[in-house]
Each structure stands twice: as C-alpha cells, then as structure tokens.
Image (spheres, rainbow, N blue to C red):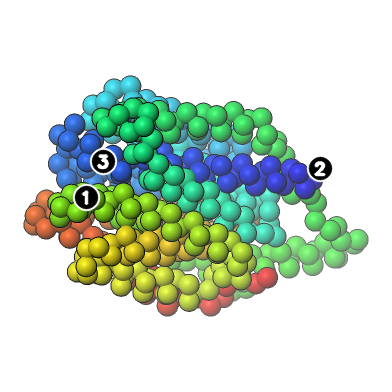
Amino acid sequence: MSAWRSVVVGGLLLLIGVNLRSVILAVPPILPLIRQDLGLSYTATGLLTSLPTLIMGAAAWSSGLLVERIGARVAVTSGLALLAAGALLRAVIPLAVPIFLFTILMSLGIALAQTTASVLIRRWFPAKIGLLSAIFTDGLIIGETIGAGLTVPLMLWLFGSDGWRASFVLWGVPVGVLLAFWLWLAPAEPLHLLIPPPIPVSGAEIEVEREVQEKRVIPAKTPVRTIHLGLLLGSGSLIYFGMNAWIANYNQAQHLSSLTPLALTLLNAAQLPSSLGVTFFAQRMTGHRWPFIAAGCVCLAAILLLIFGPASLEPLWAALLGASSALVFTLSLALPALLAAPAKVARLAGATLSIGYSMAFLGPFIGGGLWDLFNLPALAFAPVVIASIILVVAGVMLPASYALRA
C-alpha cells in the first residue's frame, strides 16, 4: 500500500508538471498567427509570450507564504483551478486585452502550484529530494515538448490553419481532468506519515537523528543565498523562454520559416533526454558547480552559432540550448528543497522562483524592445547571450558546500 501510494503521488507530481507547461508553450508556435490577427507589435508579442513568467515571478514569493497558511493540497487544487479557468477563457473572447487578462489569471495558478511542488517534495520524499525534483522537472519538460511540438499539427488536423483560438481549449481541458484526479488521489496526510522512516529507539537517538537530517539539508555554517539560487534558475529559464519566444518570428524575418517547426521541436524535445539523464544522477549532481558552468558555456556557443553560423544548422543549436537549459532548471529547482529547513522550503522556493521568473520575463520583453528599436532581428537573442554569461559566473561562484551530501 505504501509503495503504491508513493507511485501515485509521484505520478501526480509528474502530471502537474506536464500541465503547468503545455498551456504556456502551446503559444509560441502560433504566435505569428496571434500577432497578425490581433495586430500586435513585436514588443506586445514579446510581452504576451513572457507575461506568464512575469506573473510567476511576481507571485511566487507570496505564493510560498500562502502555501504555509492554506496547506499544500489546497494550494495545488487552487492553482490547477486557476490554470484551467484562465486557459479556457482565453478562447472565449479572442481580443488582445482579454487574452492578456486571462493569461495573467492562469499564470497565477501556475505560480501557486509550482511553488507548492517544492514543499510537497520536501514533505513527502525527504530522502529523495534530488530524484523527485528531477521527476517533477521531467513533467515540466514533457509539457513543454508536447505543447511546442504538437500544437500546430493538432491545430491543422482538428481546426484548420486559423484555429489558434481552439488550440487554447485543446490544452485547457487536460488541466481540468488533472484537477479531478488530484482531488481524488492526492493524500490528505503527508506521504512521510504513510511511509515512516526508521524510528530511533530512544529520546537521545531521536535528537541525533534530527540533527543528522538538518545537517543533510543545510550544511553547517552555510548561508543560503537566495539571489544566487535565483540567478541560476533565472538564467536557465531566460535562455529557454527567450528562444521559444523569438525563434518563429526571427525565422520569419530572415525568410527561414521552413526551419521553425524543427527548431522549436528540437529546442523542447532535447530537454527531455537531458532531464531524464539528470534524473538518474540527480542525487550526485545537485549542488555542484560544474554542471552549471558547462551548461552556460554550451549555451553561449550555441546562441552565437545560431546567429552567425550557417542557417541550416539552426535546429542543432536550438537542441543544445534546450538540453542545457533543462539541465540547469532540473538542478536549480532542487536547491530550495535541499537547502532550506522544512518549515522554510515554501518561502525559499517562492523567493527563488520570483527572481528566476522575473529574469525569464525580462529576456523576451527586452529582446522584443531591442528588435523594435534597432530593427535588427538578432537583437531579440541578446538577453540569451547575457544569461549564458551570468550562468557561467554564477556557477563558478556557487559555494562548494551546496553540493548534496548523500
């Protein structure tokens, strides 16, 4: 029974991750259609695609505080309900202002549910934080992949070439289904109560066990630098969301639209093998410097080659950017649950996500502004170049004591 419940809850975390991203990443492939039909400027287009990251960043810290008051189960329920409502309502009034407003609504739901995930992982699986964080991230990446890769084919097959409004319904309905399964299957009690750890036989041993657990989570005399965690998470997220926001429009401006489906698909699909590979080694890799440094170097080389190299190789560079950003996101997402005391996981996770997603918002928005200002499509990727450099520097400066003590 205990093992079965563990699998069920792990599966729910995976599916939550899938739905938190499929709704967002279904937009970039149809962004040229939305921009044309709604008459949006490139700056407004960049704002639409980056608005979820802005709201997630602005609401993540307060979401962490809210989780502490209403409980993790209720928080996920509320987050999924907001996400489903916002996603479906976007299709009701296909005008610019309502779409922006409903995007804000669903983004609030994403912020609440995603911030709560770290709390659930720390509470339900305290001995497997790296593994379960990687599984949750796998769900996020699967959602990104299917949202980016299947939206256009499914739209053309089911709704026609101008069916971008109906595609909002296509990805909103599964969120409602997941909400029903969550209410049915999510345990009312923390999973660690259903699968208790070995119980020490004396009061003294209980105290020793508590000290061991705390030292495993927070290395002695090591301050948890929220801004540092936010820079790591934000750099990886900016790279990923920045590429998703502008590949389609960049290729259209460069008369390379034929490359867009493959480039976007590989950008997102390459994340999955990267994340799955990290899953098996997450306990050993989490908190170490070298993965962040290596990922930053790969991203910097790939984005420069995408801009200045042969156009035919764009899908390859997109794949490298996707795989590297997935590695960064997987490892950085585990750090709040790893480093914070149990009662402070929600706050640290919320603060880290606030910094990270604020960076992810600024990237596409500034990129669109630079394009409008100088009329140079390549400048849309300037924030991605800067984020790659920040990732290398932040990786070098990561305290060695953050490494997971297995």
Residue beneath disc 2: 1
Label ID, residue 387: none
Residue beneath disc 1: 257
Helix, strand or loop for disc 3:
helix
Q: Do the residues labelled 3 and 2 touch (CB within 8 Å)?
A: no
Question: Left or right: where does residue 295 sit relative to residue 8?
Answer: left
Helix, strand or loop for disc 2:
loop
Q: Which residue lies furthest to the left in this view?
A: 374
Seen at 61% across and 34% down, the residue is 182
Distance, label 3 to label 1, CA atoms, is: 13 Å
Location of residue 258 in the rendering, given as x and y in whole percent from the top left corner: 24, 50
176 or 316, nearer to the observer: 316
Q: Do the residues labelled 2 and 1 touch (CB within 8 Å)?
A: no
Question: Does residue 3 lie above or below 219 as drawn?
Answer: above
Seen at 15% across and 52% down, the residue is 255
Distance, label 3 to label 2, CA atoms, is: 46 Å
Location of residue 242 in the rendering, given as x and y in whole percent from the top left corner: 30, 55
Helix, strand or loop for disc 1:
helix
Residue beneath disc 3: 31
Which quadrant of the rendered structure holds the N terminus?
top right
Occupied quadrant, residue 373: bottom left
Question: Does residue 334 lie above or below 24 as drawn?
Answer: below
Question: From the viewer's perspective, is the residue at label 2 or at label 1 nearer?
Answer: 1
Location of residue 193 in the rendering, given as x and y in whole percent from the top left corner: 77, 46
- Can the viewer see residue 271? yes
